[in-house]
Image (tube, grey):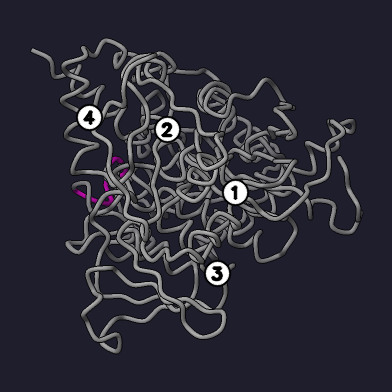
Amino acid sequence: MNKQDTATPYRDAALVIVGHGSTLNPDSAVPTWEHADAIRRRGLFAEVQTAFWKEEPELRRVLRTVESREVYVVPNFISEGYFTQRVIPRELELEGPITRTGDRAIYYCDPVGSHPEMTRVLLHRAAEVAPGVPPSEVSLLIVGHGTALNDNSAVAVKRQVREITALGLYGEVMAVYMEEAPLVNDWASLTRCPHVVVVPFFVADGLHSYQDIPVLLGIESEVGAALSQREVFWHNPHHLHGRSLYYASAIGTEPLFAEVILDQVAAFDAAHPEKPSLPPREGPDRIDAHLREWLETGGERLGEVAITRSGPSGFLLTHWRDGATPHDTLEPFRTPEAARSIAMYDDAGAFRPLKASPTLRRGWKLELDSFAALRRALDFLYPTALGQAAARARGALCPVPLRETLERQTGMYTVARKVTDEEAHRVITAQCGAGCQNRVLWPLAPGGAAAAPPRETAPDRFPLPCNEACNLLVAAIRTAVKERK
């Protein structure tokens, strides 16, 4: 690696933290964001980005938001399994631990859940949830998902059970799963100690750990709303089946996870001391330059966001439909990170998994003090839009035919390949027509025209190009095929 300063060895590199994300639960991505924010504040890397399989920024597009020559990719996944071994390498087009593409090198690190420090993190979480309870009187249950897709999905959980059992701290330690035996819903018959501590071995308090597992444990009678949409329910202990049951937050929400992410970067360097020789980065940031040029030539609106200058170096962002609303009546925000929460829900409180949908809520104003803050805020409001547009402006954004995207699918999405042209056009019209502000550039099949009618972009509006079908569209196509009569 071309390191100029051993005190800050990654100051010219980018870190991309990859999570699973969700199109249904707004909290699945939160720990990944929080760990990225914590690392970004430390100034260790030139850039820190997040990417997701089922959320934005999407894996297929995230590298266009990165300018650095060296990119470390760390999967924020608990186990070495289907997603880390197949999905992430496929979507990022990785060839192994080190992938050289043009003037860039991508370093693929091990997932956080495979790091030895995970035992310390798990013990910290277990002790935290049941303070004052003697460990010798505790049955510690580590909950994994369990899946037939890849036998390695349970390896990380079983490893933790072995490590903690060897320490002799707890009365008993065992692994339980949601989809394979031993099942988490059998916890009462599986354990013998008077106190039971349950730690979900998941990255986030999302659909599984916050909504599904509590029902399986008997804490809740039915699946409730997401974490961010109601009060935390785990008021420990819960007295069930003559036991005291303590339910912890998902292991991935532990702040120590940020340190594990950094440890995986260091572990990669230790395992791969020889890296490609790369040319130094030259000239200004291409994405920043493209955005500056657009602003200087009269650009005023990106998606549903109106952008106006404020003072010598500041910017004011509002919903364009609030242009006639007195600004002193709008809810004020002042940090780029606030844009992430602004973009999360629509006016009715529904989760917005697709940020390009024309449903951005109204009634807010975001006051930013610099161009750098503007860039960050826009990246939160419209993930990858700036990178996509800058790539297109320099001729580096190649449309990918829908059929090619579908052929790349695996697992439960393989069936999407069976979609007919008629079904595909129907789904595209519904999803990409009125439901998305992006301009579709990709054809249905190689050599064809764009699969959706082109949108004209006014000179003052930032173009939102879409060069490849997103995961939401692929999921909708899968549903169409499954529902075929």
Q: CA distance from mark 2 to mark 1?
A: 41 Å
Mark 2: secondary structure: loop
**Disc nearer the start of the sequence (2/4):** 4
Please state if 130 lies on the left or on the right of 13 as rendered.
left
- Foreground mark, 4 or 1, reads 4
The amino acid type of the residue labelled 4 equals: Ile
Coordinates of residue 174 in the picture (x, y in percent): 52, 35
In the figure, 25 relative to 329: above or below? above
User: Which residue matches tag 1?
Assistant: 122
Quadrant where the C terminus is found in the figure: top left
User: Which residue matches tag 3?
Assistant: 373
User: Which residue matches tag 4?
Assistant: 428
Coordinates of residue 464 in the picture (x, y in percent): 39, 46
Please state if 136 lies on the left or on the right of 55 as rendered.
right
Cβ–Cβ under 8 Å for marks 2 and 4: no
Please state if 447 lies on the left or on the right of 425 as rendered.
right
**Disc nearer the start of the sequence (1/3):** 1
Quadrant where the N terminus is found in the figure: top right
Region in magenta: 216-221
